[in-house]
Image (cartoon, grey):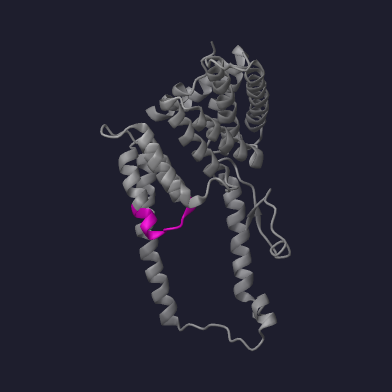
Amino acid sequence: MSEKSAVLHFDLNHIATLQYEHLGDDIGCSEARRIKGQLKSLMESALNETRIDSPVYTYLPDLNTPTLTAQEIKEIVKDSDEAEKEWGYIFNSAEEKLKFGDFSNAKELYQKALEIRPRDEYLIQRLTLCTYKEKIESKSRVMSCMDAMVILSDLSPETSNDPETTGMAGAINKYIWMDTKDITFLNKAISFYNRGYTIKKDYYNGENLALCYFEKSKQLKNTETANDKDIVFNEILAEKTFKSVLEITEGIIESTNFNERSDVKWVYATAAKSASYLELKEKEDLYSSKFKSLCDNSWDFNTFEENKIKKD
């Protein structure tokens, strides 16, 4: 299986592939039902097919196919079911804790889930998120961000082509910059967000890239060695990126399957911030009200408010 827009490498592109359409953070309900039906048909066809079609046996004709007794199959299925139930309980509990902003308990549960699936990229991303969002009285946000970056390093964000990974690396560096005002971290955030936005043109990386350009122009204005050209350059980049992001989000909003997406409120949030920067008051008010009507926990709203654009 592969995402509809994915480009397969030369050694895979000749293999029959079932394609699906990705909607934001997950696959929509109707698309999931369609793919489920197609997978079922393919599996039934494969079970009824006696011909061996694996390329392994084409090139190694003397290789014997593996066989299992009915009892062995039964035991494998039983063990798999038990492991899946344990995994499902831990994972769903973690997602529920995260939904309501309980980052500390969610973090513990994601750590347990990672013990079962040590290299799961989604779990590493979730654990990273909880680590830099978690508030601990004895630890500064900068230290939490440093811890988060250590966790995320397993996914090699500097070379990653996953916009979620690059976006998290950008967020970590942005938060460190917010607390230290060290422009080195702001430049790192710009680099990560720009990588993610270049790869996928997703609204999350785009919004934060534009915000960082804007914040960099503001900080440059307050330096003794301010260069007017650098300031104007970052202001132009901010405006250009916000225009692009607004087009992307409005395109998503107008799409026929928009309401099936799991990230509807975040699309509205980004559209509102983009419209705000571009001084499109009517659109800003519309998208802000849509976002607020969908907020079901405080940390969503707090994140939105924390990242509001404050022009001079």
Quadrant for the N terminus, please: bottom right
Q: Is residue 47 visible?
A: yes
Farthest-out residue, bottom: 62
In screen coordinates, is 112 left or right of 72? left
Identity of the residue drawn at 59% across and 46% down: 30
Return the x and y of residue 136 as percentages of the image width and height: 29, 34
* In-front residue for pair 180/54: 180
Whole-percent x, y for residue 37 in the image = 60, 57
Residue 180 among magenta residues: no
| Location of the C terminus (image quadrant) | top right
Residue 233, by quadrant, is top right
Left or right of 141, for residue 275: right
Res. 9 image quadrant: bottom right
Q: Is residue 170 left or right of residue 98?
A: right
Q: Residue at x 61, y 55 (%)?
A: 35
Residue at the farthest top position: 312
Query: Going 73% across and 64% down the picture, which residue do you hit?
Result: 14
> Which stretch appears magenta?
112-121
Residue 77 position, x and y percent, is: 42, 71
- Horizontal side of 273 relative to 140 (left or right) equals right
Q: Magenta segment, principal secondary structure?
A: helix
> Can you say whether 117 is above or below 206 in the image?
below
The answer to whether 47 is drawn above or below residue 19 in the figure is below
Residue 100 seen by the camera: no
Q: Could you tell me how many numbered marks the image carries?
A: 0
Q: Residue furthest front?
A: 225
